[in-house]
Amino acid sequence: MAKAYVNFSVSGEVVAKTVEALQLAKQNGSIRKGVNEVTKSVERSLATFVVLAEDVEPEEVVMHIPKLCEQKKIAYSFVPTKEELGKAIGLTVPCAAISVENQGSASSAIKEIVSKITGKSQKAEPAQQQAPAQEKKIKEKAAPQKKESPKEKETKQQ
């Protein structure tokens, strides 16, 4: 059964490209590893690309990260296992989430991954399109309606 936070499936080709991009970013750029560090990186808008493992248990640990990425307009992807994600950046232990802050020489690879993912992730796009309309409605409700005084009515009529 698919996890609730996995919004789209990623092909093997994209997973291999993602692992390669993470290795390049580790060598020449800067990354953050671990759910807490990734969350801080995304909230502060420092992250440029986020990768999550699909096999995180319990899933509530990382469930908030895709929503944060969508709000901050940060690209994200998935890899099948935590072990694969950890090995991608040279760890001997599993890793649930990684964010790339400075892409370094991985920028072209990350752009290619993002272009492939955005063509496939149809679920994430409608949510982003609905958000501005909802925000506009909220702003309209929150804005206090100014009542016109009799003097203002007179000046408008003239």
Image (tube, helix red, strand yellow):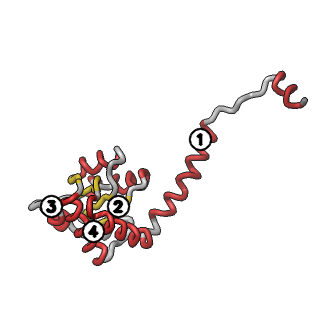
How far from the left and from the top, in percent, is residue 155? Answer: 85, 26
Q: CA distance from mark 3 to mark 1?
A: 43 Å
According to the image, label 4 marks what residue?
A: 18
Q: CA distance from mark 4 to mark 2?
A: 10 Å
According to the image, label 3 marks what residue?
A: 94
Crowd tier of the residue under label 3, counting other residues whose Cα lies within 10 Å: few below 14, some 14–19, many 20 or above: some
What residue do we see at 28% from left, 54% from top?
A: 102
Marks 3 and 2 in Cβ contact (< 8 Å): no
Q: Is residue 56 above or below residue 46?
A: below
Q: Along the line of sight, which residue is nearer the eye, 5 or 122?
A: 122
The residue mark sitting in front, 3 or 2, is 2
Marks 1 and 2 in Cβ contact (< 8 Å): no
Q: Which amino acid, by three-letter code, is at mark 4? A: Thr
How far from the left and from the top, in percent, is residue 47? Answer: 32, 52
According to the image, label 1 marks what residue?
A: 139
Q: CA distance from mark 1 to mark 2?
A: 29 Å
How far from the left and from the top, in percent, is residue 58? Answer: 24, 57
Q: CA distance from mark 3 to mark 2?
A: 19 Å
Marks 1 and 4 in Cβ contact (< 8 Å): no
Element under disc 2 = strand
First in residue order: circle 1 vs circle 4? 4
Element under disc 1 = helix
148 on left or right of 37: right
As drawn, which residue projects farthest toward the right?
A: 158
First in residue order: circle 4 vs circle 3? 4
Q: Which amino acid, by three-letter code, is at mark 1? A: Lys
According to the image, label 2 marks what residue?
A: 76
Q: Along the line of sight, which residue is nearer the eye, 64 or 93?
A: 93
The residue mark sitting in front, 4 or 3, is 4
